[in-house]
Amino acid sequence: MASKKTILLLHIIKHHRNVDQLKREGLSYREITILVSESVDSDFLKYEHDELELTELGEKLYQENKGLIKKQSKKEWIQKDERSKIPKISKDFIFLPNQNELNF
């Protein structure tokens, strides 16, 4: 049985996507390279005209296991935007704006 990461790699190559999905799964670029090499050695992928393509075996494996990469929960496929998160302040905190910065 193929791993989720292998099926995700086949999905990325089949649909001409970038490797950001694999990066979000926690793989480094080196590990992605190793995964591609292993997939070529296992005859799931082939180089043709300087492009990676799925072989018949790779296509069959992808079709049988593409349910592995489907995310059911909305929390899994929508990432939180941590950059705009405001830190909590206590209820006793009193904010006094700088009078020189007010423009009314």
Image (tube, rainbow, N blue to C red):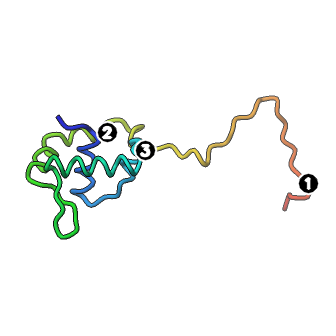
The percent position of residue 87, horizontal first and vertical second, equals 69, 38
Residue assigned mark 3 = 78
User: Which amino acid type is marked by label 3?
Assistant: Ile
Which label lies toward us, 2 or 1? 2
Cβ atoms under marks 3 and 2 closer than 8 Å: no
Residue assigned mark 2 = 71
Residue beneath the point at 38% across and 42% down: 25
Residue beneath the point at 86% across and 58% down: 101
Q: Residues within 10 Å of mark 3 (few under 14, many from 20)?
A: few
Cβ atoms under marks 2 and 1 closer than 8 Å: no
The percent position of residue 54, horizontal first and vertical second, equals 16, 55
Q: Residue furthest bottom?
A: 49
The percent position of residue 48, horizontal first and vertical second, equals 16, 66
Residue beneath the point at 28% across and 47% down: 35
Q: Residues within 10 Å of mark 2 (few under 14, many from 20)?
A: few
Residue 46's quadrant in the figure? bottom left
The percent position of residue 36, horizontal first and vertical second, equals 26, 51
Residue 29 relative to residue 2: left or right:
right
Assign the C terminus to one quadrant of the image: bottom right
Query: Gap in Å between the C-alphas at discs 2 and 1?
Result: 50 Å
| Rendered view: 33 above or below 2 | below
Assign the N terminus to one quadrant of the image: top left
Q: Earlier in the sequence, mark 2 or mark 1?
A: 2
| Rendered view: 76 above or below 90 | below
User: Which amino acid type is marked by label 1?
Assistant: Gln
Query: Gap in Å between the C-alphas at discs 3 and 2?
Result: 10 Å
Q: Earlier in the sequence, mark 1 or mark 3?
A: 3
Residue assigned mark 1 = 99
Residue 75 relative to residue 15: left or right:
right
